[in-house]
């Protein structure tokens, strides 16, 4: 974004919020689904409500990493304007937003961002403040990458959508703002791009980001992640909380890398006791149905026949969850999205299993780009890649029909 366009956006942002507020203020109480209110009526209500709180607001003590080590609180406190935060893919929870206070703290400057953080309105970021009103500590939560908003007020400002991957987020660019990193490290982080993150880079020093995955539709899916390293979500929650977020706890897996991964942060464990409730909440998040009118129903019917027949998709994307993850993993040679360039390590080679899990397809319409490395920008591109590399012999119209079926899931 150029300096001129960024300044113009910064000027228009508070004005647009004011104009939009009249139309949007009541939507949170009337239309937004508040899971906390719903789950407390069930037998597991307390667990799910606590899991929601952990998912949205718990940092596991990772302020020591983001504040003490990376010093990102200094950058946000002194330099980050609200429009820059939105450009980086950060989201604002309109149900937390007090507009008058936000405007009073200069929405054209870093003061506006500080006020959003003070209101706990920035999805996935938690801040504390000193007596001067400056940011004292900054931490991140699960929701930073695995929640977005419905844009009910403005792009990037709306009601929370937990479990939806934030493919607008540029985590590498955010990390690269740290004054504690070398120029070489910043170059790697800046190379990732929006919606991409490498959860192995700080362990093996190899650069190969993957798309931020959804955290919805995981009930009954075992194993969970791209490479099937752990049977349950709690395995990956612990890995991310300790090794990526910098939370206080321990993660150990001797299968990863040449000498395994063994990371301990702090002397207090702020992770283990929260994993059961966190997993329960994530499992409760359903895959979103496709928007009305978003696919061609007749083409989707034809595509389903191809999916289950000539295209051979159902051989791996099988059962009601559209995955054979519960019965087998796949060698990298079976995966059509593997990099072909010499010297580029496969993502699987950096994992515990050295294999890939078949991705579930429910809600797949929601989170382009596709494949673990984001190499297919559309569902049509996904089917075309399989058609070419698996020599399926599908016509162009048949490729389109299968894509329409995928959009219907």
Image: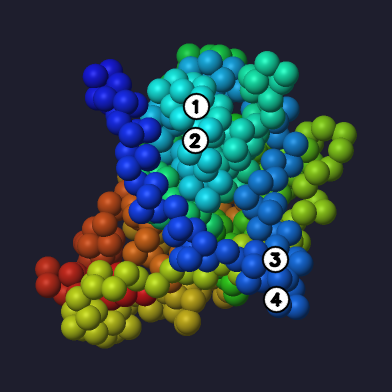
Q: Which residue is mark 2?
A: 100
In the rendered structure, are the residues bearing label 2 and label 1 in contact, judged by CB atoms less than 8 Å apart? yes
The residue depicted at 67 percent of the width and 71 percent of the height is 39
Between the residue at mark 3 and the residue at mark 4, the CA separation in whole angstroms equals: 11 Å
Crowding at dot 2, Cα within 10 Å, few <14 / some 14-19 / many 20+, comes out as: few
> Compared to 297, does 258 lie above or below?
above
| Mark 4 secondary-structure assignment | loop
Q: Give the Cα distance between marks 2 and 1.
A: 6 Å
**Residue 322 position (above or below residue 256):** below
Is residue 280 visible to the viewer in this orientation of the structure?
A: no
Q: CA distance from mark 1 to mark 3?
A: 36 Å
- Counting residues from the start of the chain, the first of labels 1 and 3 encountered is 3
Q: Which mark is residue 41?
A: 4
Q: What is the x, y in percent for residue 325?
A: 54, 70
Closer to the camera in the image, 363 or 236: 363
Disc tally is 4
Would residue 274 be found to the left or right of residue 199 on screen?
right
Disc 3 crowd, CA 10 A, few/some/many (<14, 14-19, 20+): many
Question: Residue 157: in sight, yes or no?
Answer: yes
Q: Earlier in the sequence, mark 3 or mark 4?
A: 4
Question: Are circles 4 and 1 on residues that touch, CB within 8 Å?
Answer: no
């Amino acid at each position: 974004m150029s300096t001129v366009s960024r300044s113009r956006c910064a000027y228009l942002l508070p004005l647009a919020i004011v104009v939009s507020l009249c139309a949007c203020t009541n939507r949170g109480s009337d239309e937004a689904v508040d899971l906390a209110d719903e789950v407390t009526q069930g037998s597991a209500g307390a667990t799910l409500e606590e899991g929601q709180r952990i998912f949205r607001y718990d940092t596991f003590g990772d302020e020591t990493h983001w504040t003490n080590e990376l010093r990102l609180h200094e950058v946000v406190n002194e330099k980050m304007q609200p429009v820059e935060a939105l450009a980086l893919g950060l989201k604002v929870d309109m149900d937390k937003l007090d507009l008058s206070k936000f405007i009073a703290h200069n929405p054209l400057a870093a003061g506006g961002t500080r006020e959003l953080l003070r209101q706990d309105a920035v999805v996935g970021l938690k801040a504390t403040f000193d007596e001067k009103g400056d940011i004292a500590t900054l931490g991140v939560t699960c929701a930073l990458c695995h929640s977005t908003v419905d844009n009910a007020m403005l792009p990037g400002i709306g009601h929370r959508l937990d479990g939806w991957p934030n493919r607008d987020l540029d985590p590498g660019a955010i990390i690269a703002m740290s004054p504690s990193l070398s120029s070489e490290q910043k170059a790697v982080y800046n190379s990732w791009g929006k919606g991409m993150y490498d959860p192995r880079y700080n362990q093996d020093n190899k650069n190969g980001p993957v798309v931020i995955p959804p955290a919805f539709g995981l009930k009954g899916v075992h194993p969970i992640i791209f490479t099937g390293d752990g049977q349950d979500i709690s395995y990956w929650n612990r890995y991310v909380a300790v090794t990526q977020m910098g939370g206080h706890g321990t993660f150990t897996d001797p299968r990863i890398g040449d000498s395994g991964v063994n990371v301990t942060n702090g002397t207090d464990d702020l992770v283990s006791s929260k994993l059961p409730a966190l997993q329960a909440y994530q499992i409760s998040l359903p895959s979103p149905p496709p928007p009305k009118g978003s696919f061609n129903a007749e083409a989707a019917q034809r595509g389903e026949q191809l999916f289950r027949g000539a295209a051979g998709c159902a051989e791996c994307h099988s059962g009601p969850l559209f995955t054979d993850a519960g019965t087998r993993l796949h060698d990298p040679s079976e995966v059509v999205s593997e990099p072909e360039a010499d010297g580029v390590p496969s993502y699987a080679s950096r994992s515990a299993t050295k294999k890939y899990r078949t991705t579930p397809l429910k809600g797949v319409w929601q989170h382009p780009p596709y494949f673990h490395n984001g190499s297919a920008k559309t569902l049509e591109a996904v089917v075309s890649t399989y058609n070419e590399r698996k020599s399926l012999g599908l016509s162009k119209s048949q490729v389109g029909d299968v894509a329409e079926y995928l959009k219907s899931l």
